[in-house]
Image: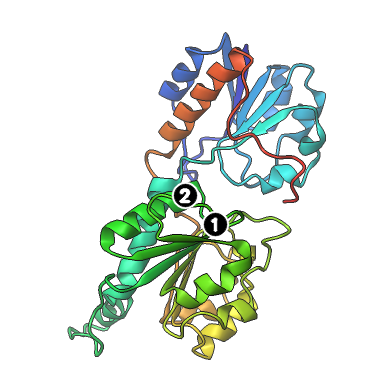
Amino acid sequence: MDVIVMHANSEKMPLKIRACHLEQMRRHADHVYYFKNEEELLASGADAEVLFAWGGTGKQPETFCRQSRRLKWFNSFSAGVNPLMECGIKDLDIIITNAAGIHGKPMGVTTMGYVISYLRKFPLMLENQKKHIRQKPDALPEEPEGKTLGIVGAGAIGSEVAKYAKTLGFRVIGVKRRAVPLEHYDRVYPNTELDTVLAASDFVVILTPLTDATRGMIGAAQLAKMKPTGVLINIARGPVVDTEALVEALQKGVIGGAALDAVDPEPLPADSPLWDMEQVILTPHCAADSTLYMDRAMEQFCENLKHFEQGEPLFNEIDLKRKY
């Protein structure tokens, strides 16, 4: 079994495939070939049963995938695979898997960072620091006790967010396609009761994937269901939230604030009102980033390589019939 690894380890890319990662793969494969991009790969004439590449953003190796005589499995070491679903790769007779499940811890930590920042009035105090003003906020800082955190998309990442939130003292509720009891949640509701969760939550965390069904699912009507003091946190995909509706809701005080790691469009235009709103925290789509990211992705991939070698079903296989 041969594996092709394709990823440009440029200085601008925080995620780097290191020699130790390639060596880890070689323990499970006959040959491992590394290329920076598809042009290098095509020029080499190399072929393999397995392709390990970034499927989350940017140009995808569609030409190689179409020309390959051996390719059986494309593993994306990103969780989001929308670019793969928008090109011809999805129509090929190959298995596609992603890196779902490795993002929970950093995204959970990031979410708690946003939450604590709002509870303890950090944005206001940071603004005062820039102005050389040392004074306490007019309103007392708050604590999690008695507050509710709602998670829209109660999956693997949501489990980590819920665990951290319960540790801090939140009541945690969630929304899932099928409402089943989940660890760390006080209650899980079906999608049809989204409004119930929005109305009850002091913090609403968006974790649902981007599909035809979830695009724009948080619009003016949904924001109006939230508490006037409620904070919307989007660490999923920008288009899940209607940006115009969110801006209007923030401007009119319909909700209390927003923490946005994912925005629509991305990158956010320089003239967007969101940049200058005191009640908004903007981060550059980095909620899942971590120095441990590639180590986790490689460990997960090598575990799946064992399944592939033994002819067993792979985990994290993408449902190609689903509309992304």
Residue 12, above or below 262 = above
- In the figure, is residue 207 to the left or right of 164? right
Q: Secondary structure at mark 2?
A: helix
Q: Residue at x 54, y 17 (%)?
A: 306
Quadrant of the rendered image containing residue 53: top right
Q: Are marks 1 and 2 in contact (CB under 8 Å)?
A: yes
Q: Secondary structure at mark 1?
A: loop
Task: Count neighbours of disc 1 (C-alpha within 10 A) and say few if under 14, some if 14 to 19, many if 20 or more.
Answer: many
Q: Measure the alpha-carbon separation of dots 1 and 2.
A: 9 Å
Q: Residue at x 65, y 56 (%)?
A: 210
Residue 153 is labelled as 1
**Residue 266 at least partly seen:** no
- Residue bearing the label numbered 2: 157
Residue 178, above or below 42 = below
- In the figure, is residue 144 to the left or right of 65? left
Residue 269, above or below 104 = below
Q: Position of residue 134 (x, y in %)?
A: 17, 83
